Image (cartoon, coloured by chain):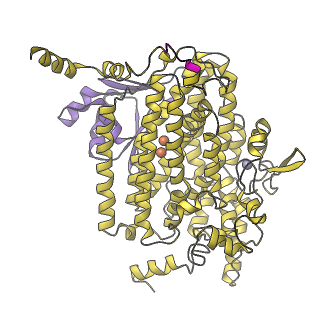
Chain colours: A yellow, B purple
Amino acid sequence: MNKNKVTTMAAKKLSLKEKYSLLTRDLDWEFSYQDRKDAFPMEEFEGIKITDWSKWEDPFRLTMDAYWKYQAEKEKKLYAILDAFAQNNGHLNVSDPRYVNAIKLFLTGISPQEYQAHQGFAHIGRQYGGVGARIACQMQSIDELRHVQTQVHAMSQFNKYFDGFQSWSNMQDRVWYLSVPTSFFHDARSAGPFEFLVAIGFSFEYVLTNLLFVPFMSGAAYNGDMATVTFGFSAQSDEARHMTLGLEVIKFLLEQHEDNVPIVQKWIDKWFWRGTRLLTLVGMMMDYMLPNKVMSWKEAWEVYFEEAGGALFKDLARYGITMPKYAALVEKEKEHISHQAWWTFYTHGHATGFHTWIPTDEELDWLSEKYPETFDKYYRPRWEMAKKLEAEGKRFYTKALPQLCTTCQIPMLFTEMDDPTQIAYRDTVYNGDRYHFCSDGCKDIFHDEPEKYVQSWLPVHQILQGNCGGPGVEQVLSDYYHFNVGADNMDMKGSPDEKRWKQWKGVA
Amino acid sequence: MSKVYLALQDNDEARYIVEAIEEDNPESTIIHQPAMIRIEAEGYLVVKRETVEEKMGRDWDMQELHLSLITLGGNVDEDDDQLSLSWNE
Ligand SMILES: [Fe+2]
Ligand SMILES: [Fe+2]
Ligand SMILES: [Zn+2]
């Protein structure tokens, strides 16, 4: 009896550090009759050298009891708000029905990747010899599963009122622009466990997700979309932990062995470049798809990469890590990519699962103000031309299918940065076949692992090879992508989404 | 020196946490953005349990911070009494 009492009192006084060491205490042991290499077969092939797993530090020292307790609290809050959103017709409070198209792109593009992150972390959580790393990956794996679930719930709510959500799981690895995020995660998941962690945990979570979630969720708040703010910030509350894991991983790898430094640098270069290419879609959402705008893509890039990333890379300099290759190029690109991307989507708007439109005059002025160096000179004239054509009843759609970059799978839409009127093309011949790239960054990545990237499933190639139904684009859209052709795609003007909105709002 | 930062959801709990941070980090800058509050400082920022408890008028566990946390930048050091962010340069 007495003994029990003492134990309870002692348990109450345990500090975070003690609790954490009790949690991890018996999860690893000396192998007496098995070779450790057979138990952790993926630990060495990438060339990473780990000398002492016990040096792995989890700064949050989150134990399972605390994890479940706080995650449960987050979930309760989240679903209470989603219920309130549904019960109070929250969809009617969004700023403008155009806004919902940003959410269509977010939920069909990003949410399936939450599931891939879940799978990836579950996999690597088994592959490390260190207990701390295994536990952190396990928690992150559960977090990511929670993220996809909450986003599917948010999506089911929007799906009752707006077009374009009905076949997201079918669309994710088929649709030409959704293969951009999907292939990004396929690339990471088919890499070794350390590259995956540098790719997703560090480059994506630490360096780049701020740009995905923070300005975008703040934008959702600004556009009256309580559901998105809620799942976004709820996911992001786990992100702080994921980011910290990402940073700890990098420091751990760099401290373990100097031979790890060039390997890690190569992965940082690769995943920074792949990440910035992927974020082109986010830039376009921020500058063109949010009717009430919080900040421009350029401003977000400056705060969340140049400032925050600059501080980070200064910190990592003591290990011999330098700024990612092509960071200087991206600094120039921030002036251009969102405009180049939205123009591409606008002109291919017959083949997108969301609506596109010409910015309003007020929005054009906002863009001129935010991009004084480039917008009026290169991009505004295109929109003035599009406006003229639309007024004449000749809304313009490009008939040709876009050529895709073999690495990032984005259409060839980026220009040379010293000549923004010239589309950038790079190509290479490998084993007798020619491969095309949007940039030197994407070409470098291919050259480092050509056997991997020659296997890329490029949506446009697949259509042209007859692997996606057909013969025409319209059949591909309806039979292979499961779009409701005529409802999900085409211009916002005249869409069923727009008509329903006007009915709800009582405007003719 | 580079900036460390953290961002919290703009909710009832976080308002007290922000008050506590302001008091413990007089050099910090508080920036209000739609639905969120960003706090930044040169080189170092600390959240102290005791100060938060004082502002809230109740017991508060350091790990409760995670319920409102949106993002952070800097090396994290957390124990039962405080969470700090810093850069090594
Ligand atoms: Fe996530
Ligand atoms: Fe995450
Ligand atoms: Zn590319």
Q: Single out the residue that lies furthest toward the front.
A: A33
Q: Is residue A144 left or right of residue A405?
A: left
Residue situated furthest right in the rendering: A432
Q: Is residue A246 left or right of residue A82?
A: right
What's the residue at 77%, 40% (across, down)? A451
Image x and y of residue B17, in percent: 30, 36
At horizontal 44% and vertical 35% (from top left) the residue drawn is A138
User: Whole-percent x and y of residue A37?
Assistant: 59, 20
Closer-to-camera residue (B64/A461): A461
The answer to whether residue B73 is visible is: no
Q: Is residue A325 left or right of residue A356?
A: right
Q: Report the predominant secondary structure element of the magenta stretch.
A: loop
Location of residue A184 in the rendering, given as x and y in whole percent from the top left corner: 63, 46
Q: Residue at x 50, y 32 (%)?
A: A125
Magenta range is A31-37
Is residue A397 depicted above or below A378 in this figure? below
Measuring 30% from the left and 47% from the top, which residue is drawn there?
A: B11
Q: Is residue A423 visible?
A: yes
Q: Is residue A192 above or below residue A25?
A: below
Q: Quadrant of residue A273?
A: top right
Q: Is residue A456 magenta?
A: no
Q: Residue furthest left?
A: A1
Closer to us: B52 or B65? B65
The residue lying furthest to the bottom in this view is A508
Q: Position of residue A425 (x, y in %)?
A: 82, 51
Q: What is the quadrant of the N terminus of chain A in the image?
A: top left
Q: Nearer the viewer, residue A373 or A390?
A: A390
